[in-house]
Each structure stands twice: as structure tokens, then as C-alpha cells.
Image (cartoon, helix red, strand yellow):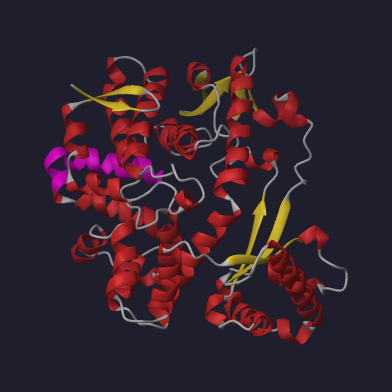
Amino acid sequence: MSEIRDPIYGFIKLQDSELGIINSSLFQRLRRIRQLALENLVYPGAQHTRFGHSLGVLYIASIMAENLLPGQDNEEKRRIIRFAALLHDIGHGPFSHISEEVLETYSSPSESGEDTGKVHEKITRDLINHDKELSRILGPDQRSQIAGLLSGENVELSLMKETVSGPIDADKQDYLLRDSHYCGVKYGVYDLHRLLNTITDYSEGEDRHIAIKFDGINALEQFVLAKYYMTTQVYRHKIRLVTDAMIVRGIELGIERDEIAWLQKLFRYSPTEEYLENYLSWYDERLMAAIVYDSKDGFAKDIFSRLHARNLFKTVFSIKFRELPENIAPQTKALMSDIRKKENKKMLDKISGNIAKLLGTPPEFVIVNAFTLKSVKEMSRNSEGVIMIIKKDGRPSSFEQESTIFTAIDEKINDKLFEVYAPLDYLNNLDKSKKLEKIDEQILNYLSTLKEAEHEH
């Protein structure tokens, strides 16, 4: 038995096999992948990595597993949950989630053998099943169970998967507290111990799912609100949106326009040992340095040099959909809403090019983005499902129905935004305001002139 000191939870106890995984090159690589990409350009303390986060998920998942699956008979299930918690992020590429978007763009279904939206999960399963260091620590049955738990396939009980990936999983519980701590904010703070003490489960046929006891509903409200505030104040911070968009655009241009061979190789997934070996050799700083210092002059080098020097694009246009003028056609609004869909790429390129002409900027340096800030009620459901409450009479019910606060919230109250990012030089704040006012007028006028025929693409 070993221990690692964590700044959030104190000492985290580790079995010998878990320490072996942590000491592997596969896991040590996570020290070089930041949890929040370039969020440190906003919050200087946000230097924390997927390494520390994975240890935190192990800690919380272990407590959940002890509560949900007690006793010697469940010892192997608890062990598999701990391994899955430790390994759940090993498939992350440089800049964490940003890599997923690029992988989905350039990895075809024929290459991945499945929907390209699952490429990141496919890489994780490949690594668990085929990494040589892991194979010396974990047996084939264990690796198969861990991969199955993370993918939700062939898992014995749903609550095992939900501990690591579900509506109220250990992953969210850790990253809210950890990101809040390192960013130096309080938005993600909630009563972790009360939440863990009230976690329970309910039966659905022969299966079992995670829920919260009715007595823990206030701690759960804290947790859901923490996720909402971290999303609006940290994860969707205006600078973070710009830096994420610049990273994606820089890599895309490096692949398509600059034809950088190693970028093409990295982001076109292939289910081979050679691909995995190369993938594991890349991390945030290596990718940044390779583009900034080792690549030929081009679009990727220009954009990444700006990121490196914090000479960022600016949000030159931002508007909520509910504030769009009535003279903008419904077809235009629909396109703006789904601007990042692959089938809209041709029209997106045309819109970006025309906006670039208005700004006097190369079209490659104009990035159009659309996103939705969901209402806190809608966000409480998560993509993994509804959070369930066990009422005092023992029956399960949805959190939305049982929470007095959330019952009163109108879930239709959300904000959908359309934004444009581009280089902008100005002398002072007054000059900046004048330029942005002019750009607002120009872009709104342009959007109002888009004719129905232009939407047929």
C-alpha cells in the first residue's frame, strides 16, 4: 500500500498494481496534458493536468464503490472500478478535449471502424487492451472488463459505469473541485462529503443505477449549480472560447493548407500499434513547440505563435439569438445555429470569407462560432441521463421533480450565441469600442442581406 498527497483530498491510498499503472509511461504522459488546455491564459493557476485529475477520480470512485458495492463478494468489482477511474483519461490527446474535435473531423468511420464521434473512446480502449506496460500489470480479463466499463458495453451493473461516467459520476465531482481550486475561484465548490454520504442505488429489473437519497438533495443542488457556474464563468470564458477555436483552426490549417505531415499522421486515427505509439508521444508543449519553432512558415505557425505569445484573436462580434434583428431571414438564423455541422462547411467558408472582406483580414484568420449556454435545469440532466432521487418512501423520482429550486426554473431560459473571432488592433479602449461598433453594424448588415438561394448548398 502506497500514498500520494493530493491538494484537494489529502492522502490517496494506492494498491501496488495501481502504483504500477501510475508509474507507467502511458500514465506519466498525463502530467504533460493540461486539464483545461490554455485556460491558464485567463486563470494563471490553471496549470493542473490530467494526471492529478485521474488520481482524484480514483479517490472519489473508490468511496462511491465502497458505499454501493460493500463486502468481500464485491471486491473485484470495486477493483475494476478503481482501475477504470484511473485509466479513464489515458486516450486524451494534446490540449485534452480539443483534440477530440480534430480527431472527429479527420478520422473517417472506415478508419475507426465506428462513428467518428467515438474516436477518443476507441483510442482509450485500444490503449487499455494493447499497451505492453499495462499488459504486464493487468490480466486480459481485467483489461476487457475495464474497457467494457468505460464504454458501457458488457458491464455487469450499470452503477459500475455510472460511478466513472454518469449523471453524478466521480469524474464531474473531481473536476469541479479541482478546476475551481486551481483557477482560484469558488464557483465549483459544493459539499462533497455530504453528497458522497447520500449516494445510493435503485433496482431496475436485475440492473442497478446510482441515485441520491432525499436527504442529500441540497448537496445535489449545490453540485448542479457548481457545474452551471463553472460552465458559464470558466469553461465558457470568452478567452477560453477564443483560444480553443484558435487551436482547432491552427491544426486544421496545418493539416489542410500547410500539409504538415506529422499533424496529418497524428489526427488521422488508425487502429494500429504504430499509430498508438506515435499518438502517445505527443502532448501540449511538444505540439506547441513543434509548430512554433520547427514547422515551416504558414497558417498554423502564425496562429500558434499568437497563442504562444498570448497575442490572441478578439471576439469582434457576439450576439444572442434572441437579440437578432427581425430582418435576418429564418434560414440564416438556422444556419448560424448549426454553423459547425460538417454539411454546412461550404456555406460557413463563404460566410467567413465575406466577413473577412469586411474586416480586411485573411479568411483563414476569421473564425465563426455558435454555442448554447443551457439553462441550469437543462444542464442538470447531463448527456448521460437524469439524476435520480430516492424519496422517503423508497421510490425513485427525478431530481427536477423533487428539488424545490429546480422545479421553479424555466428550462427554456437559455442563451444561444453567435460569435466571430479575428485579429483586431486598436490604440486604446475608445478606439476598440468604435471599431467593434462599426464591425457590429457591418456584420449585421451582411447577415440581413443573405438571400434564401445562398442557403441551398
Res 142 quadrant in image: top left
Q: Going by the picture, which residue comes out furthest to the left? A: 136
Residue 294 placement, left or right of 117: left
Residue 82 placement, left or right of 191: left
Please state the horizontal and vertical placement of residue 318, each as a whole percent of the image.
70, 63
Name which residue lies at 70% across and 25% down.
Answer: 403
Whether residue 36 can be seen here:
yes
As drawn, 403 above or below 231:
above
Q: Is residue 5 magenta?
A: no
Q: Quadrant of the C terminus?
A: bottom right
Res 409 quadrant in image: top right
Please state the horizontal and vertical placement of residue 132, each as a whole percent of the image.
14, 50
Q: Quadrant of the N terminus?
A: top left
User: Which of the two residues, 70 or 174, is positioned nearer the viewer here?
Assistant: 174
Please state the horizontal and vertical placement of residue 450, each as a whole percent of the image.
77, 82
Whether residue 88 can be seen here:
no
As drawn, 183 above or below 223:
below
Q: Which residues are magenta?
A: 133-153
